[in-house]
Amino acid sequence: MEIKRGRCALRLDDELRSDFLLWRHYQDVHKAVHDFAPDVIHITGPSDIGQLGAYVAHKLKIPLVASWHTNLHQYAVERFGRWLPFMKPQQIEACVLTLTLRFYQLARVLLAPNEELRELLQTRTGKPTFLMQRGIETETFSPAHRLRLDSKFKLGYVGRLRPEKNLRALVRVEEALLKTGINDYQFIIIGSGSEQEWLNQHLQHAVFTGNLTGQSLIRSYANFDLFVFPSQTDAFGNVVLEALASGVPAVVMNSGGPKFIVESEKSGFVAQDEKDFAETVVRVMRELANPERKHQLREAARARALCFAWSRVFEQVYEAYDTCLSTQQVLAVEANKSNTISTSTSTMSKS
């Protein structure tokens, strides 16, 4: 079933809104889930629909699985830090993380997009936590779509143009390029958001395409020479995987999920900070001037993406579901034992 958000829903992004009144659909959702009679309910975080799903699971006594998709604690610092001058960034992050983890404790079993978050969730919640990465359609995103009519080096970025993506680091990249005398390049920035105006004013060689989908997006990926992704808040980084599948090596930061996708110095590069990010981009651009090295990196990027098969992802998810059901059965047995003991005690007391 599909439920719609109201006009008063809070806009979180260009295509994402949160409706605090989504609970008005509770009766319809409750009936639909009850009639479907699922073995488990899987929610994808503390969004409006996630909260509704968790409540329905509780009311129907259906085991709940929750997967982590967004580092809300880090997003909060980037988006709302300036509105909370009385709190330090570390305090905001710690507070939001604690609240988010409390929500995830409602579930029996958790799923995380990378090993770092898996350990965090399991340690802080005490819940069984499994790895749930993303798969990639390697026939859709492929080097076969590459068609270049110019020799200008293209640095690509795909994603939201928002503060949490750390896109202002691209200006530092351009400064490093110009300082070393590299002028024959172009940033191709795909996406939309509040940072576009600032970037447009501060980047000399950049093209902003807005949001692209379908063949336009697929061809753009394949035509990149290097994918630059300075975000430090992404839990996974789907766009990095899409770039690799297109045969494009990527430069990412050492914070967040993307560093688990690339194989550093092989299919991509992991920078330690913004300064290192800029220097790495310059170094890799020089390396790619060598046809043999360019072929090596593009082949390695493609090979890395081929490791992310959907079948492998689903196997891990099904294992989490099985664990959730097993936990439910154990709790049911313990509850029956408790009821039996309670009844026996009551009977003895009457005797």
Image: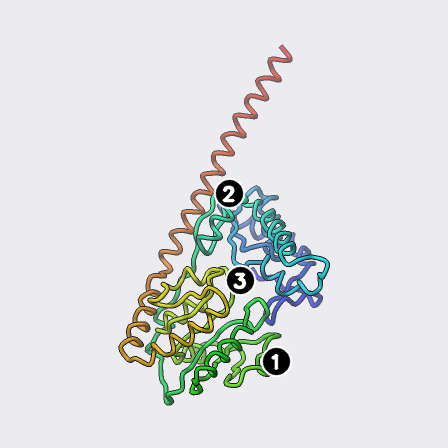
Q: Position of residue 111 (x, y in %)?
A: 48, 51
Q: Which residue is mark 1?
A: 197
What amino acid type should be assigned to the residue bearing mark 1? Glu
Among all residues in the image, which is located at the extreme front? Answer: 179
Among all residues in the image, which is located at the extreme bottom? Answer: 149
Locate the N terminus and report the quarter of the image it occupies. bottom right
Q: Which residue is mark 3?
A: 233
Q: Nearer the viewer, mark 2 or mark 1?
A: 1
Q: Tell me which corner region of the image, top left, top right, bottom left or bottom right, holds residue 238.
A: bottom left
Mark 3 vs mark 1, CA separation in Å: 21 Å
Q: Residue at x 51, y 33 (%)?
A: 332
Crowd class of label 1 (few under 14; some 14 to 19; many from 20; radius 10 Å): few
What amino acid type should be assigned to the residue bearing mark 2? Lys
Mark 2 element type:
loop
Q: Position of residue 98 (x, y in %)?
A: 61, 49
Q: Residue at x 58, y 44 (%)?
A: 60
What amino acid type should be assigned to the residue bearing mark 3? Thr
Q: Nearer the viewer, residue 88 or 159?
A: 88
Relative placement, left or right, of 181 versus 288 is right
Q: Is residue 32 above or below residue 9?
A: above
Mark 3 vs mark 2, CA separation in Å: 23 Å
Q: Which mark is residue 127?
A: 2
Mark 1 element type:
helix
Q: Nearer the viewer, residue 58 or 97?
A: 97
